[in-house]
Image: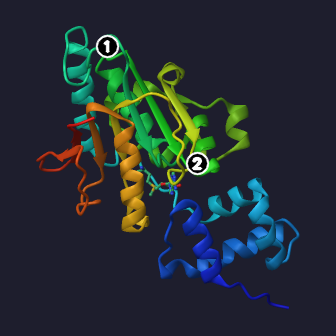
Amino acid sequence: MTEIIELPRWQSYIEAEIGLVMPKRQNRWVYNAILELAKSNHLSIDELWQAVQTDRLLRQQLFDSVLIIESRFFRHLPSLNYVAALAKDYAQTSSKPSHLAQSSPHLPFRVWSVGCASGQEVWSLAMMLEDSKIDNYVILGSDVSLTAIKCAKKAHYSGRELSLIPAQYHKYIQNIDTDEAKVDSFKHWKIADELYAKVNFAQHNAMTRSVPTPFKQQVIMCQNMLIYFRRFDQRDILAKLVDQCVLGGYLILAPGEALFWQHPKMQRLTHDSVNVWQKIAE
Ligand SMILES: C[S@@+](CC[C@H](N)C(=O)[O-])C[C@H]1O[C@@H](n2cnc3c(N)ncnc32)[C@H](O)[C@@H]1O
């Protein structure tokens, strides 16, 4: 017998937990994801509904199956170039007092990529900073999807993705050895070991009060995530990101995102192609 799935109830639940508002055109996809999850756990739809309320693992599986985990290496080059330029400036001035270094020189240049998907933005930036000979930096990538974070940490990617990486950064990739390639035949290469030391990933839901790092950041990037959220959730998330920025630090969104947003501690900077804000008050 075909089971009835009350999609609005599931969609409201997902939105309340992780903020994601699913477009109507994805109804069939969400429907199939719920059906598949129930089937693979040998549960009826009603039993699955009850179970996700209390079973953290199952709830995570539900989120992972509906999230849009899509990213690309060097997806928005102007934003990456902007951060790389800030990092260079920071490296040159961190021994002197400056707005980004504040009063604590020699602290690493910290970047947090919120909604980092499978790590492409984070690794792209790491390649650029390494190539610019910047060594005192730490990049944190976070995403609510556990599957995405596992992929980001593993950093194994497909041959098709390699074509998006400019040749000058190919020195930061390595072949996967044959045993590893047998496990996942779609992945052909991985990020070079030397980049791992300054990069961290954490599973984290941006809708929660907690933050995945105790450190304030020089730059927070949150690109192509907020478009799936309602305005009031966007505002709440952005307010938390402001708190996690150092005074003088930057918040970078994707072009066109959250243009309605205003915040007393943030000033939107004029830039042709980067949607960037600077923290002007503590
Ligand atoms: C379209 S991807 C964008 C990835 C990357 N920032 C980029 O621009 O290529 C959006 C990401 O946001 C993540 N996401 C959605 N809701 C989230 C939440 N509540 N907390 C953290 N990450 C979330 C998704 O899992 C997905 O990986």
Instruction: Reply above or below: 236 against 97.
Output: below
Q: Secondary structure at mark 2?
A: helix
Image quarter (top left, top right, bottom left or bottom right) of the N terminus? bottom right
Q: Which mark is residue 148?
A: 2
Residue 29 seen by the camera = yes
SS at badge 1: loop
Residue at the spot x=14%, y=45% of the render?
269
Q: Is residue 85 left or right of residue 153?
A: left
Name the amino acid type tagged 1. Ser
Q: Nearer the viewer, residue 143 or 170?
A: 143
Residue at the location (20% across, 21% down)? 89
Q: Which mark is residue 170?
A: none
Which is in the foreground here, disc 1 or disc 2? 1
Q: Nearer the viewer, residue 236 or 84?
A: 236
- Are discs 1 and 2 less than 8 Å apart at CB? no
Question: Residue 105: horizontal and vertical position, in percent?
Answer: 30, 11
Q: Quadrant of the C terminus?
A: top left
Asked which quadrant contains residue 231, the reply is: bottom left
- Image point (23%, 28%), residue name: 86
| Left or right: 10 in relation to 121 | right
x and y percent of residue 175 in the render?
56, 30
Q: Is 236 placed left or right of 132 in the picture? A: right
Residue under numbered circle 1: 104
